[in-house]
Image (cartoon, rainbow, N blue to C red):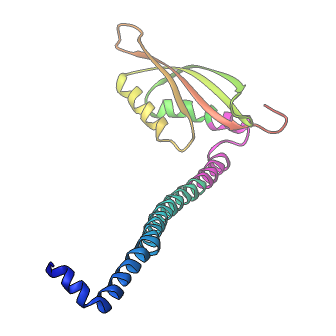
Amino acid sequence: MSLLKRVITEKRRVVVPLAIALGVNMLAYALVVQPLAASSEGAANRSNTALAQRRNAERELDLARALVTGKSKADEELDAFYQDVLPTSLGAARRMTYASLPALARETNMRFEQRTFAVEEVQDAPGLGHLSIQMELQGAYENFRDFIYQLESAPEFVIIDDVQLAETGTDQSLTLAITLSAYFRVGPDGI
């Protein structure tokens, strides 16, 4: 008889309960512990996924709040622009440009030749009018540069749309044809 068989036979009272306890432990591990471990691991994975989704949702919420804040700030700045910068009417836009442009030409040693105005309502922006001004000036190149600089740094909101420079004779004088835009608010009755 082998040694193992002899030990099992002689110590049967101890070996059988140990074998049964081992079998019960293995069965409990297979039926209870392992499914709980898998369930726990799944819960941890779901928890990590939920945490990542929460962080993404918080980030999207912050972006949405920033967008709302930025939009409201842009609306405030646009309202301030309409109220503080743009002339209140066509008459105000004409007053802003009618005397100041020839005066600026004189200040920069340019000769004012002619000017024409055209008025239209801006199609894409209801409540906004457009005053187009075409001017012709004569003078030296340095004076043109000074005129344009002074015009762009003036507090009045006037946009330079087009500049054409041409030589007008043998005396080195140049003609500047410049197209300007001034925008103004239109009342409920239109222009």
Q: Residue at x 68, y 49 (%)?
A: 83
Whether 75 is among the magenta residues is: yes
Drawn side of residue 19 relative to residue 1, left or right: right
Q: Residue at x 56, y 27 (%)?
A: 180
Q: Main secondary structure of the magenta part?
A: helix
Quadrant in the rendering for residue 149 = top left
Q: Is residue 89 above or below residue 69?
A: above
Residue 160 is situated, as x and y percent measured from the top left of the image, at 51, 29
Region in magenta: 70-96
Q: Residue at x 38, y 75 (%)?
A: 26
Drawn side of residue 138 relative to residue 67, left or right: left
**Residue ranking furthest to the right:** 189
Drawn side of residue 165 relative to residue 191, left or right: left
Q: Quadrant of the C terminus?
A: top right
Residue 45 is situated, as x and y percent measured from the top left of the image, at 44, 63
Whether 176 is among the magenta residues is: no
Looking at the rendered structure, the number of numbered marks drawn on it comes to: 0
Q: Residue at x 61, y 24 (%)?
A: 133
Nearest the viewer among 149 and 186 is 186
**Residue ranking furthest to the top:** 170
Quadrant in the rendering for residue 44 = bottom left
Residue 94 is situated, as x and y percent measured from the top left of the image, at 68, 33
Nearest the viewer among 101 and 22 is 22
Q: Is residue 188 above or below residue 50?
A: above
Residue 22 is situated, as x and y percent measured from the top left of the image, at 34, 80
